[in-house]
Image: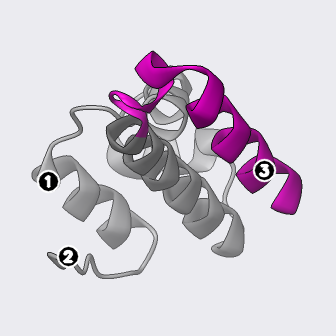
Amino acid sequence: MNNLKNYISERKKRDKNFEEGFYEGYEQFKIGVMLRQARESAGLTQDELARRLKTKKTAISRIENHADDIKLSTLERVAAALGKRLQVSIA
């Protein structure tokens, strides 16, 4: 993780455009990672989760890898399918 933090810090110093939109993109990335981790901790494959949500594996992959503009209702459905509850906070 230190390597990633160092890379980000150095890149921001060299490229002012890098910082524009960085945090928004990073937050979206984190959502996808959290969803994948929740699915894996529930012991489910993308196919199994897709069946529970009555959708396709490609939809689950898209959510996990490109979580930009994901609807709150979709997050709630995914959480329920994983036997979890969605918790949102504003910091």
Q: Residues within 10 Å of mark 1 (few under 14, many from 20)?
A: few
Asked whether residue 1 appears in the rendered view, the answer is: no
- Where residue 16 sits in the image (x, y, percent)? 46, 23
CA separation in Å, label 2 and label 1: 10 Å
Q: Residues within 10 Å of mark 3 (few under 14, many from 20)?
A: few
Badge 3 element = helix
Mark number, residue 56 = none
CA separation in Å, label 2 and label 3: 29 Å
Q: What residue type is disc 3 on?
A: Asn
On-image quarter of the C terminus: bottom left
Q: Main secondary structure of the magenta part?
A: helix
User: Which of the two labelled residues, at mark 2 and mark 1, occupies the earlier sequence position?
Assistant: 1
**Residue found at x 57% / y 68%:** 38
Asked whether residue 91 appears in the rendered view, the answer is: yes
- Where residue 7 sits in the image (x, y, percent)? 77, 40
Q: What residue would you read off at disc 2?
A: 88
On-image quarter of the N terminus: bottom right
Q: What residue would you read off at disc 1?
A: 72
Q: What residue type is disc 2 on?
A: Val
What residue span does the magenta drawing correspond to? Answer: 1-22
Is residue 66 one of those drawn in magenta? no
Is residue 4 one of those drawn in magenta? yes
Q: Is residue 31 above or below residue 16?
A: below
User: Which of the two labelled residues, at mark 2 and mark 3, occupies the earlier sequence position?
Assistant: 3
Q: What residue would you read off at disc 3?
A: 6
Left or right, residue 7 beside residue 15: right
Furthest toward the front, the residue is 13
Q: Which residue is more in the foreground, 24 or 32? A: 24
**CB atoms at circles 2 and 1 under 8 Å apart?**
yes
- Where residue 39 sits in the image (x, y, percent)? 59, 62
**CB atoms at circles 1 and 3 under 8 Å apart?**
no
**Residue found at x 66% / y 30%:** 11
